[in-house]
Amino acid sequence: MPIIPAVTPNNGVRMPRLGLDVFRLPEADDTPVRAALEAGYRAFGTATIAAFRATPPRGA
């Protein structure tokens, strides 16, 4: 698995520096999410908190 750069903030939780924004992806299309997971991504922005999207795409 590829090494994804990470940062550790004051709370000690290691967070990936790279992420994938899935805000505009069609809900039924999980192909980009699966490809990102296989590439090592572990952070996904779904915009659900910002109320732009009711549900994230499958796989996120």
Image: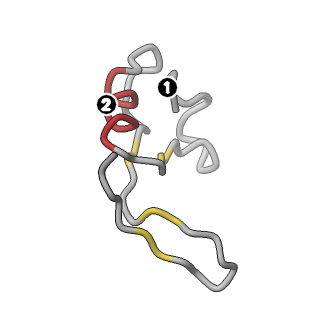
- Tell me whether circle 1 and circle 2 mark residues in contact (CB < 8 Å): no
Q: Amino acid at mark 1?
A: Pro
Report the residue marked by disc 2: 35
Q: Tell me residue 32's x, y (percent).
A: 32, 29
Residue at the image position 52 percent from the left and 65 percent from the top: 15
**For the view shown, which residue lies furthest in the top direction?**
28
Q: Give neighbour class at mark 2: few <14, some 14-19, many 20+ (Cα, 10 Å).
A: few
Q: How many marks?
A: 2
Q: Quadrant of residue 24?
A: top left
**Closer to the eye: label 1 or 2:** 2
Q: Tell me residue 38's x, y (percent).
A: 35, 34
Mark 1 vs 2, N-terminal side: 2
**For the view shown, which residue lies furthest in the bottom direction?**
10
Vertical position of residue 50 compared to residue 34: above or below = below
Vertical position of residue 32 compared to residue 5: above or below = above
Q: Is residue 5 left or right of residue 46?
A: left
- Mark 1, secondary structure of its residue: loop
Report the residue marked by disc 1: 57
Q: Tell me residue 48's x, y (percent).
A: 60, 42
Q: Tell me residue 23's x, y (percent).
A: 43, 38
